[in-house]
Amino acid sequence: NAGVTQTPKFQVLKTGQSMTLQCAQDMNHEYMSWYRQDPGMGLRLIHYSVGAGITDQGEVPNGYNVSRSTTEDFPLRLLSAAPSQTSVYFCASKVNPLDVFGGFFGQGTRLTVV
Amino acid sequence: EDQVTQSPEALRLQEGESSSLNCSYTVSGLRGLFWYRQDPGKGPEFLFTLYSAGEEKEKERLKATLTKKESFLHITAPKPEDSATYLCAVKISQGGSEKLVFGKGTKLTVNP
């Protein structure tokens, strides 16, 4: 099993550019989520999905869009990148929100916006 | 406001020197508490889930405990490979869904 795969691992964007961070899992998990991790702060939830076709906002959703057309994939889109979006982004998945297991995280995407 | 505070921010131990990490929380609608380990450049790795006060979980040199207001991660006779950042997260019920609120983490360094 590959688990949770994130691509790319590193990315540099110019302010105003758009891009999509990819996240795929091969465990048939219903619940997927995106977090950002900034120095001196805890992981913060951006968006999450409880299944294909269903998404919802987390704590810091502004500037990000998501969609969930399949169970496997949960891409995160930055429509117009800003320096404040410089961060490390993690995708996570688990069977469902009630699962006692804390979930699998990807390796992260380190994004720099200049 | 829901808050999770971890202390200390950083901890240096000698190999074999036991200690504890603390995670205190003020949240409404607690649905569980999670501990993760995060190595540099990697994503968090799940360690434990605790649901009720008095509950304990163990894995190798690690033992997690939970009270009504805090959780402890006890590390017994640590080894250098236990060096990592340990994250605590509480699961809360919010607006019909359940979400995780993370602490900032404790960076543990174990010297040989």
Image (cartoon, coloured by chain):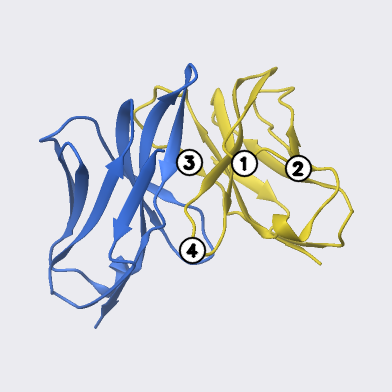
Chain colours: A yellow, B blue
Instruction: Check disc 3 and report its element: helix, strand or loop.
Output: strand
Residue drawn at x 63%, y 45% as measured from the top left: A5
Q: Chain of mark 4?
A: A
For disc 1, the neighbor class at 10 Å (few under 14, some 14 to 19, many from 20) is few
Mark 3 against mark 1, which lies toward the viewer?
1
x then y, percent, for residue B79? 23, 71
Instruction: Check disc 4 and report its element: helix, strand or loop.
Output: loop
Tell me which amino acid carries mark 2: Gly
Instruction: Check disc 1 and report its element: helix, strand or loop.
Output: loop
The lab-note entry on whether marks 2 and 4 share a chain reads yes
- Looking at the image, residue A96 lies above or below residue B38: above
**Is A14 situated left or right of A55 in this image?**
right
**Splitting the image into 4 quarters, where does residue A58 fall?**
top right
- Looking at the image, residue B32 lies above or below residue B64: above
Q: Chain of mark 1?
A: A
**Quadrant in which the N terminus of chain B appears:** top left
Using the numbered discs, state the Cα–Cα distance from disc 3 to disc 1 in whole angstroms. 21 Å
Q: Chain of mark 2?
A: A
Q: Which residue is mark 2?
A: A63
In front of the other: A6 or A85 = A85
For disc 2, the neighbor class at 10 Å (few under 14, some 14 to 19, many from 20) is some
Q: Which residue is mark 3?
A: A104
Using the numbered discs, state the Cα–Cα distance from disc 4 to disc 1 in whole angstroms. 16 Å
Q: Inspect this view and state whether residue B9 appears.
A: yes
For disc 3, the neighbor class at 10 Å (few under 14, some 14 to 19, many from 20) is many
Q: Earlier in the sequence, mark 3 or mark 1?
A: 1
Residue drawn at x 89%, y 53% as measured from the top left: A17
Farthest residue in the left direction? B54
**Quadrant in which the C terminus of chain B appears:** bottom left
Instruction: Check disc 2 and report its element: helix, strand or loop.
Output: loop
